[in-house]
Amino acid sequence: MVIHKSFADFVLFLYLHMAHADGDFHETELNMVRDKMTKLYDQQEIDLDLKLKEAIDEYNGFEKSNLIKLFHDTFGHFRKVKFAQKYKVYSDLYDIIRADGKVVEAETKALKELKEIIDINSEVSHQ
């Protein structure tokens, strides 16, 4: 299951997943997502606020029971993306969960799951 045409759109979806891991979009976490988006997209070509709103709508409308399959399949789909870039995404996710000043168990669990998926897909692509 792959729903994103670009790695940047998938990364934005991951950012939102992490910002929502505790069940709520905190404004400080969304501000961190907005900041990270400036490195994903050319601001001359894309309205970042509109892009964020559309991505939130997409995330909210996605069946959450399919998230792990989506993450596995999409990391596999973008297997040509270098491991270093994928690991940068992981460190960005950590920044997002820390943005509101506290890290709860649900966020730690979500981050761990994504790290394992990134690690698994890096092993598969190196074999």
Image (cartoon, rainbow, N blue to C red):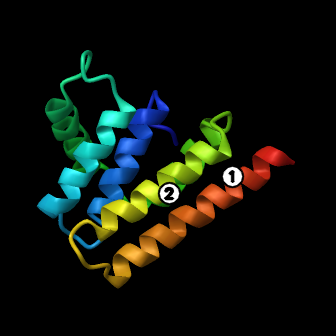
Residue at x 25%, y 40% (from the top left corner): 55
Q: Position of residue 113 (x, y in %)?
A: 53, 68
Tag 1, which secondary structure?
helix
Does 76 sit left or right of 39 as displayed?
A: right
Kindly give the residue lying farthest to the bottom in the view shown: 105
Return the residue at label 1: 121
Q: What type is the residue that disc 1 sits on?
A: Asn
Q: Height in image: 81 above or below 30?
A: above
Q: Nearer the viewer, residue 72 or 22?
A: 22
| Pointer 2 local density, CA inside 10 Å: few below 14, some 14–19, many at least 20 | many
Q: Nearer the viewer, residue 104 or 92?
A: 92
Q: Position of residue 22 (x, y in %)?
A: 27, 73
Q: Height in image: 36 above or below 117?
A: above
Tag 2, which secondary structure?
helix
Mark-to-mark CA distance, 2 and 1: 13 Å
Q: Nearer the viewer, residue 122 or 76?
A: 122
Q: Position of residue 35 (x, y in %)?
A: 26, 44
Query: Can I make out residue 29 in this image?
Result: yes
Q: What type is the residue that disc 2 sits on?
A: Tyr
Residue at x 57%, y 43% (from the top left corner): 85
Pointer 2 or 1: first along the chain: 2
Does 114 sit left or right of 65 as displayed?
A: right
Residue at x 52%, y 62% (from the top left corner): 114
Residue 90: numbered disc: 2
